[in-house]
Amino acid sequence: MSSVDYFQLLKLVAPEAVMALGALAVLAVDLLFMRCSSHHQRQTMGAFVAGLGCLGALLCLLQSGESASLFGGMLVVDPLTRMAKAALLILTVFTIILSIERTFSDHVGEYYALILLATIGMMFLVSSEELLMIFVSLELTSLSLYILTAFHKRSAQSAEAALKYFLFGGMAAAFTLFGISLVYGLSGATGLREIAVALEGKELDAPMALALVMTVTGFGFKIAVVPFHLWAPDAYQGAPTPTAALVASGSKVASFFVLAKVLMIGFSGFEGDAGWRHFVSGWAPILAVLALLSMFLGNLAAIAQSSVRRLLAYSAIAHSGYALLGILSNSERGFSSLMYYMVTYALTAIGAFGVVAIVEERKGGSRLSDFAGLGRESPLVGLSMMIFMLSLAGIPPLAGFFGKFYVFVAAVGSGSENSGLLWLVIVAIAMSAVSLYYYLQVLKQIFVADETSEPSVVREESFTNIAICGLAVLVVILGCAPNLLVAGFDAAVRTAGFK
Amino acid sequence: MLAWTIYISFAGALLLMLWPRRFAQSAKVVALVVALLGAGFALMGALKAGPGMTTICRVPWVPSLGIEYHLASDGISLTLVVLTGIASVVGILFSWNVERRAKEFFAFYMVLIGGVYGVFISFDVFLLFVFYEIAIIPKYFLIAIWGSTNKEYGAMKLALYSFVGSAMVLMGLVAAYVVAGGATTSLIDLAQFEFSKEFQYWAFPLVFVGFAILAGLWPFHTWAPTGHVAAPTAVSMLLAGVVMKLGAYGALRVAMTLFPLGLQAWQSEIGLLAVIGIVYGAMAALVQTDFKFVIGYSSVSHMGFVILGLATLNEIGLSGAVLQMFSHGIIAGLLFAVVGRMVYDRAHTRELGALQGLNLSARIPFAAVTFVVGGAASMGLPGFSGFVAELQVFIGAWRAFPSYAILAGVGLVIGVAYTLRALQKVFLTDRAPGAEGLAPALDPISTPEKLGALVLMAATLLIGLYPRLLLDWIVPSFQSPLFERLRKGAAW
């Protein structure tokens, strides 16, 4: 670690570099060549260039096979981070395709550039095992997402959503930073692995507990778990659809990934125990309580929603609760299950928001009743929405079912006697039975309800349709053949140096 | 061969979805061909496989979790696969008049059938669970879109009950999988793992009741009457005919083989619930005014015999339970066909009082004959399959718990009463004076209906007269390693 080999470094960050170049290229192309073109052409061009950037970055990822950890964990490149980045890039590509036919803004170049910047932030986030770097990339992601949320300038809701998201997010960042500073004070290090070494054998005293709580609080905002979830329903409702999709997918995948790493690697001595009547202080009981609250509140509040966007937001909160079980299991299998769960969830969420976008375009809103008759107007879109909703409800053979099964198995099987987290898993399964009710409400509108209003003018949105159908197919394939992802994640996690 | 029953059904569903809209009226023909092929595969596969355990296909699915795609059959599966084959074909014959969104109707229908076939030949608990859940969702849409009375309520209630049941099953299975070492989901391996007595004591009721909700176990049966009544005819036939069997089959195949000690601990409680179901269902059927509710509650009563047979824990009771699954599948199909298709679609009412004046026995004599045959079979008259099956359950129950057997006998007597009451009110009342002239002509019974009814009547007669056809499959199945721990514990 004495001298920096810049060429080597550039090779390692090639995907991020390509993405950054892509962001600049989008701005330049839109500014220089597309000023006089129609909105649709500009959108298509912007999406094309941005998509090219993502694909270029994907190619770089596939080509390199090196593993390295630079600057005390600031930049970690190994199979696991590579898989996470590939997943993020694919999610971003789908978000970009969804954006093409949206008309909420004239600032095409800036829009796509910001999407790419947010993705770069996420990519650095997953490839870092060092608290400062994590914080910086977290901020890059968040700031881009705040702006993207406010991008629908003519909509007051969009502005309100962005402001809420920003205020909550800013507060969360402060908490995270405070936690990080405490950790640094206690351990004298910022690299996760060094922190673990420095804190080994230490008691969980008051400052350490404070540091833990602060850090978890900060990340709790990002992944929207109860009681840090208040921004989510408003942000999901007000944000432009592609932004909401990105917030619900990529941002969440990256945040869960890094939260798991911080807790499982950095705070590996302080997990405590969340087993039934075996509570031992540490981060596990904190997460268990958060998971419990999220599953309850998310699922119960979703039942009462009449807006599909808010329904998706509360369902997202519930899903964060389930996913926390993966971290709670604190094992390699747990991490692998978390990754499978979040990636498939993210694909489903993007798809669902794509359908919401189509409905809003036609009916002007996304209330439940606006979905009436969708199944007959566009059978393929209706069918895709059925796949997304059933996958979220955890019906096999869709990806959501295997994700849940895998996370549950990992959580029950995690170490401690008394079947570990069985109590939490039982709650999770019971709550997922509740969730079927509100997902079926959406499907009931689509397939069963008679159309209330006049049949609307159907504007064919070929790009959006392609993205939605592609996502639906992916959800089915990953559900029928989960091993496509699981084998990869398993192998990658084994090399990543968890205990 | 048997595996193709699953693939052909799902392929058929896909084909029906893609079927061009302008040919929607021919969707039923496509569905019939697919169902016939499926039934053909089922029958031929069953004849070839024989009663022993035969593996059809076994490949790793998720190796790191030990999940396999393992299809296999034994005599119990074969019995139920054949039942599914018959029921699926007949169901389509009885939905020949579905005109509204026919394509979708038959697509959902075939998905349901594919899931049902899958459950019956899965020998991996994960796979079995997957197929089990696949069968839940189409039911919701079939009832909510094409149903009648209170259809959205009935559909949602059915879906939620099923899903809560499967959630209970999932809890038990996840726990069992982890306790057994987390390396395999193979049914055979798990059935041979010695779970501790304490674990079985709480895991068994969870899984058993979870499955048995779908089999109409009292007091979790309330989805059944409302669901049956709300459903379109073919779906009522399938619900009572095969879907309720899914629950009973899961209880036998998974809950009882995995947790035999749990079963012994809870044996008399489950027997008691079953007997209450028999008597309660019969008494409820006796006072219904809606013709379809009569049959709906009679299903609860007859499924009580299946559960009672399972709880006896002796060979004759268990094989009686499986035979009763088959028999009730056929008979319930027949009765629902009369009520839903032959009578309701023509008279547009199911109120017993209103039907009384319509003089149906003269106007649609075929329906009357069919109901007499179905009713006789349902009452357990010798010569029909119901008699053989319920007799076996009785003998088994007599050995295990005599007092319950007596109570079940009371249920049987009430069964005769409600069947005769329905028969008398609907078909045998003297014509009301002057009604003849007022009533519009009823469509004659169509050929598909006749065909379907004849197939079902033939099946119940055949098994009633020569039950060994199925018993030769069923009885040896209990000798397989799958039931080893159950046999040892019960010492039969």
Image (cartoon, grey):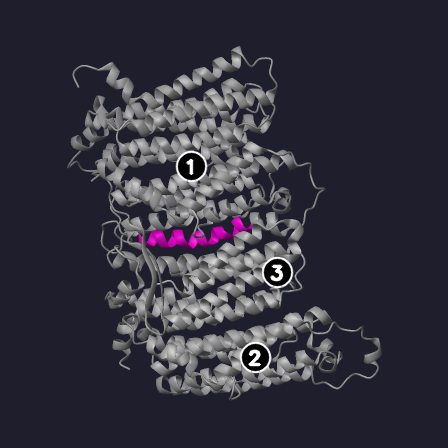
Could one spot residue B243 in this view of the protein? no
> Of residues B162 and A25, which is closer to you in this image?
A25
Query: Do the residues bearing badges 3 and 1 touch, measured as CB atoms within 8 Å?
Result: no
Residue B22 lies, with reference to residue A40, above or below; the image says below
- Say whether residue B377 is left or right of residue B339: left
Query: Which label number is shown at residue B28?
Result: 3
Image coordinates of residue A331 in percent, x first then y, are: 25, 44
Q: Which residues are magenta?
A: A421-441
Q: Three-letter amino acid code at disc 2?
A: Met
Residue B418 lies, with reference to residue A304, above or below; the image says below
Q: Chain of mark 3?
A: B
Find numbered disc 1 in the image and state the secondary structure of the residue it sits on.
loop
Mark 1: few, some, or many residues within 10 Å (few <14, many ≥20)?
many
Which residue is tagged 2? Answer: B457
Q: Chain of mark 2?
A: B
Which residue is tagged 1? Answer: A224
